[in-house]
Image: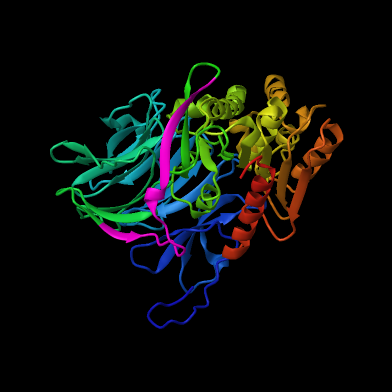
């Protein structure tokens, strides 16, 4: 801890924290989360500056090993929020900053499958929730003095297929970030008149970030915008005049002309008739006759949406004639919460089938061909790589699997691993359920490696990875080498200094990406 007035470091040292925290309004104390032996934020403490950590007051302890926890504060400095959640259930407890010694008060008791989050709007809380079968979420309001569920009143209704991602409130405006058909937009409502408008954008596919504002009494918010061709831009936006002011544009030191590239959003028909969004980036002069190599990226888990944002790394492939593609497959929330539900638990195989459908479409429409598609995914996306390798090895020229979660069944059977209990809502609990055991066993990549000709595969692991232990890619590669009937190389690289996020350091990370792209270029038929 450092005194900003003097620049001197203070004696206060807080160890074993979960990161983040919230200051009390007077700046004399703060709240933070502490980690348990399984590296899970499980306790919230109140620290008074100038006192030993051992004297910190325990404010709240979460004893359910399946839940994580965070602590934060409101813009008006009226409340400390304690956010408790797993992948599908949440609960809030509030501590008024008028009495920092009080016990935090429960807002709405946790109910399995019900999520909610809160932001303060003066005399009301605005609550984003999926309660009442609102799969794609709705916004409620409740009085600050009594925000319990019995007092929730709807202000933004649920619209199936339009997912409300986040919300913010200011003195005169309520705003939220929503996504429909894979594209985000920012909606702003005047709290006095109820009038709404959206901030409009012209490109086919793009990415938005809503930063909001640091002050409550303001008409100006901040957001970021980028696309696969447009570098990241930061804007101030006046919610009254609707004027936007460009503050900063990401610089590309080597130079970048957006007009040299094309960004497109296409839709691939899946096995059951749904349309899978696919974002494309390629140079304007790239031939679309099936000859172009393609790197097809996918993830498809935890409701995470892969944004169609700017990434200079992709340009290095596009400049070599590649089509860079992102398959927005089920398991993410690209097309709403139902898109996520259709790619988890007993419906997990939809994720893999959607990715194969994207490859089929790109081949059919001659953006590329099966002989030129290199697939890439990491972590849960690495599971995707293992699954499609088993299901359709003939449709890929190569596969890149970074820290791949390929030993799903054995991992979910080991409840001593830190992340296993919180992961059961995503994959299933094979310890308690015979049916869920069978579901996982049916697709778990390691358990389904067979005698077939696999394409070239590059697997990457990290020795200190706490999420996907290094032996998962190692044992998967060993089984692939044992079972394959082909002669394609199956490679394993274990970074002895890396964890789940890959190599640390800017240049080391770039070297790792270059290594992956070199593999893609090597196995592509024509570059």
The stretch in magenta equals 246-270
Q: Quadrant of residue 248?
A: bottom left
Residue 379 image position (x, y, % from top left): 63, 43
Coloration of the structure image: rainbow
**Which residue sits furthest top?**
272
User: Vertically, is 494 above or below 182?
Assistant: below
Res. 384 visible in picture: no
Depth check: 481 or 379 in front?
Answer: 481
Res. 387 visible in picture: yes
Depth check: 418 or 287 in front?
Answer: 287
Q: Is residue 480 left or right of residue 361?
A: right
Q: How many numbered badges does the structure rendering display?
A: 0
User: Vertically, is 456 above or below 23?
Assistant: above
Depth check: 95 or 394 in front?
Answer: 394
Rendered-image quadrant of the C terminus: top right
Question: Is residue 107 one of those drawn in magenta?
Answer: no
Name the residue rendered at 46%, 76% in the picture. 2
Residue 459 image position (x, y, % from top left): 72, 45
Name the residue rendered at 39%, 39% in the picture. 205
User: Vertically, is 337 above or below 83?
Assistant: above
Q: Is residue 162 left or right of residue 268?
A: left
Question: Is residue 259 one of those drawn in magenta?
Answer: yes
Residue 255 image position (x, y, % from top left): 43, 61
Q: Is residue 391 left or right of residue 267?
A: right
Residue 303 image position (x, y, % from top left): 50, 35
């Amino acid at each position: 801890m450092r005194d900003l007035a003097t620049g001197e470091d203070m004696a206060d040292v807080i160890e074993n924290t979960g990161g983040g925290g919230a200051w009390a309004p007077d700046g004399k104390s703060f709240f933070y989360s502490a980690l348990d032996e399984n590296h899970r934020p499980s306790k919230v403490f109140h620290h008074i500056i100038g006192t030993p950590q051992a004297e910190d007051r325990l404010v709240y302890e979460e004893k359910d090993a399946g839940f994580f926890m965070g602590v934060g504060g409101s813009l008006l400095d009226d409340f400390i929020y304690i956010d408790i959640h797993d992948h599908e259930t949440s609960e809030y407890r509030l501590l008024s900053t008028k009495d920092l010694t009080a016990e935090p008060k429960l807002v709405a008791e946790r109910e399995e499958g019900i999520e909610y989050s809160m932001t303060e709007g003066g005399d009301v809380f605005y609550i984003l929730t999926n309660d009442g079968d609102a799969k794609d979420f709705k916004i409620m309001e409740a009085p600050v003095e009594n925000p319990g569920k019995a007092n929730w009143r709807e202000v933004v209704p649920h619209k199936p297929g339009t997912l409300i991602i986040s919300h913010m409130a200011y003195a005169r405006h309520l705003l939220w970030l929503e996504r429909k058909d894979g594209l985000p937009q920012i909606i702003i409502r005047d709290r006095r008149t109820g009038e709404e408008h959206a901030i409009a954008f012209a490109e086919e596919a793009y990415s938005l970030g809503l930063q909001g504002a640091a002050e409550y009494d303001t008409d100006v918010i901040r957001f970021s915008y980028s696309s696969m061709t447009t570098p990241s831009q930061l804007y101030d936006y006046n919610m009254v005049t609707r004027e936007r002011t460009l503050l900063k544009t990401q610089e590309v030191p080597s130079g970048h002309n957006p007009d040299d590239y094309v960004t497109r959003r296409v839709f691939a028909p899946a096995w059951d008739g749904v349309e899978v969004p696919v974002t494309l980036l390629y140079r304007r002069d790239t031939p679309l006759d099936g000859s172009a190599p393609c790197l097809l990226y996918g993830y498809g888990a935890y409701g995470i949406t892969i944004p169609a944002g700017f990434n200079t790394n992709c340009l290095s492939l596009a400049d070599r004639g590649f089509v860079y593609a992102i398959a927005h497959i089920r398991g993410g929330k690209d097309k709403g919460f139902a898109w996520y539900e259709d790619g988890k638990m007993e419906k997990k195989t939809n994720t893999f089938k959607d990715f194969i459908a994207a490859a089929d479409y790109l081949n059919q429409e001659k953006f590329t061909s099966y002989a030129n598609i290199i697939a890439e995914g990491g972590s849960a996306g690495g599971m995707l790589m293992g699954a499609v390798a088993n299901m359709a090895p003939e449709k890929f020229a190569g596969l890149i699997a970074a820290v791949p979660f390929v030993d799903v069944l054995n991992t979910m059977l080991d409840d001593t691993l830190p992340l296993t209990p919180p992961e059961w809502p995503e994959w299933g609990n094979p310890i308690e359920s015979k049916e869920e055991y069978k579901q996982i066993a049916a697709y778990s990549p390691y358990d389904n490696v067979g005698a077939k000709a696999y394409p070239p595969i590059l697997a990457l692991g990290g020795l200190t990875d706490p999420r996907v232990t290094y032996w998962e890619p190692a044992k998967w590669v060993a089984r692939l080498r044992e079972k394959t009937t082909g002669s394609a190389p199956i490679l394993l690289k274990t970074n002895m200094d890396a964890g789940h996020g890959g190599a640390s350091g800017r240049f080391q990370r770039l070297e790792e990406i270059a290594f992956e792209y070199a593999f893609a270029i090597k196995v592509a038929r024509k570059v």
